[in-house]
Image (cartoon, rainbow, N blue to C red):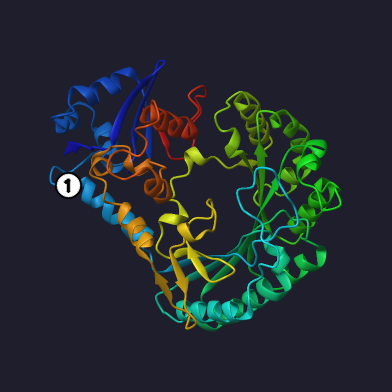
Amino acid sequence: MKLSKYTILIDDDGQYIAYNTASNSMMVCTREIVGLIRKYSHEIDRIRNIHPSLYDYLKDKNFIVSEEADETLGFIQSLKQELDDIEEYSITINPTMNCNLRCWYCYEEHLAHSNMPEKIIESIKKLIENIVGNPKVKSLHLSFFGGEPLLGFKNCIKPLIEFSDALCRKYDTSFSFGFTTNAVLLSEETCDILARFDREVSMQIPFDGDRPMHDSIKRTATGKGTYDRILTNLKYALSKGFYITVRCNYTTKSAASFRNLVEDIKPLLVTYPSRVRVSFQQVWQDLNQHKANPIIDELESEISNIGAHCYCSDADISRCYADKKNSFVINYDGSIYQCTAREFTDSNKEGVLRADGTIEYNERYHRRMESRFSNPECMECNLYPICNICTQKRLEQGNTQCPGSRFPNFKQDLLLSRIKALYRLSQEKQSPGKNHF
C-alpha cells in the first residue's frame, strides 16, 4: 500500500486533520497519529503492525491505496463517467429574456417581446422525445430561467411540462422541474397548476434584504415594492409541497438588513426544515468587499441553530452543471448555451437547436468539453477533485496552467474552506462521515 496522492495532512492551530480530496473523507487526529502517518508515508504498511485499526480505517477510506493504483487515471475515469452520465438529463429553458423587474446588478439585457416562438417549442418537444425515448435515460429535469420565466408560463412552460410529464409517464422515466424566478407572478393559480402534476417542484427565489432594502431594488414598473407579495407567494408554494431555496443577494451595504428577513422567514424554516433552505450569495459587483462576512456567518449560524439549512458552496462536491454533457441551456431563439451565469450572446453561444430536435454544437462547445481534462497541471494537482473552477472560467482564463494561479493563496484557501465547511475547527462534535483517532 502507499499513501494516496490525494491525502493531505494538516496542522492548523493545534487541530490535526487527514483529508482525502478524492474520497472527500476527513479524519480528525491527534498529533501522534499525524506524526505516525508522516513518519511512514513511504513505507505505509508498517502502520499495520503498529496501529491495526488505524491502518484498516486508512485503507477503507482511501487515505492509502494499492501500490499499483493509477489514482489520476482512476479519478478522471470516475469523474468523466459522472459528467457524461447518459442516465440523467437536465435542460434549462429560457422562455423569454424579458423581465418584469429591473435589478441594478443583473447582468442580462432584458429584451422586450423576446418570447419563445411556437416552432422552437415544437423543436424542444422533439428533443425531449428523442431523449426520453432512449431506454438508457432514467431521469429528466427541466429548469426554467431567463429573464423572468413566468412571463412565459401559459405559452411555453405549461405546454412543455404537460408534454414532458405525459412522455415520462409513458416511458416510466423520472421527471422533475424547477424555476429561477423573482416569484412576483407565482400566483396561487400557477402553484395549483404545477402541483397537479404531482412531481418534485423546486424554486430559487431571490431577496435583496429586508422589506425597505428589497423594495428599493426589486420594484414593479409602477415603482411598487415586491417584498410582501413575494413572501406571500413563497409561503403558498411551500404549502403545495414545493422545494424552495431563498437566495439572499447581499452586498456590504445590505448584509445587515437580512437579519430582518431571517426573522420573517423563521416560521417557514421551522415548519418546513426539509423543503426550504437559505443561500447567501454576494452580488458579483461587490465581491472584493469582505466586510459583510461576519454578518453572514452570524446569520448562517442562527439558521443552523434552529435546525434549518443553509447552502454551503464550500462543502458542495458536485461539479458545475456547465461541465456536464447532458446539461445545457436552450434560449428563447433556439440558441444553445452551457452556462447561465454569462450573457446569452452570439460570442457565448455553443450550438443551435435544429427543427428535428437535435443539437448542432460549435467549436466553442468542443473546446469546453476538452478543457475538463486537458490541463496537465490540474491532472497532477492533489486538490483537483475539490477544485471549483468550472469550464466557463477555464475558457475565459486559459487552460495551460492552474486557472487559480492568479489568485494569491488560492490552493490554501480552497483546502481550508472545504475542511472548515465539513467540520468547524472550533467545534469538537462527532458527525457522520467524520471520524476521530
Q: Position of residue 228 (x, y in %)?
A: 84, 47
**43 or 87: which is nearer to us?**
87
Secondary structure type for disc 1: loop
Q: Position of residue 197 (x, y in %)?
A: 68, 73
**82 or 225: which is nearer to us?**
225
From the image, which quarter does the C terminus lie in? top left
From the image, which quarter does the N terminus lie in? top left
Instruction: From the viewer's perspective, tell me whether residue 72 is left or right of residue 126.
Output: left
Q: In which quarter of the image is residue 399?
A: top left
How many other residues sit within 10 Å of disc 1, few (<14), some (14-19) or many (≥20)? few
Residue 338 appearing in the image: no
User: Which residue occupies the extreme top position in the image?
Assistant: 14
The correct choice, above or below, for 121 with respect to 70 in the image is below
Instruction: From the viewer's perspective, tell me whether residue 425 is left or right of residue 115.
Output: left
Residue under the image location 73 percent in, 73 percent down:
154
Mark 1 — residue? 69
Residue under the image location 47 percent in, 35 percent down:
422
Q: Please, what is the three-letter code of the amino acid marked with disc 1?
A: Ala
The correct choice, above or below, for 223 with respect to 382 in the image is below
Residue 95 appearing in the image: yes
Q: Quadrant of residue 237?
A: bottom right
Q: In which quarter of the image is residue 400?
A: top left
Residue under the image location 77 percent in, 67 percent down:
190
Instruction: From the viewer's perspective, tell me whether residue 426 is left or right of residue 238.
Output: left
Q: Where is residue 398 in the image (x, y as percent from the top left)?
A: 34, 44
The correct choice, above or below, for 213 with respect to 241 in the image is above
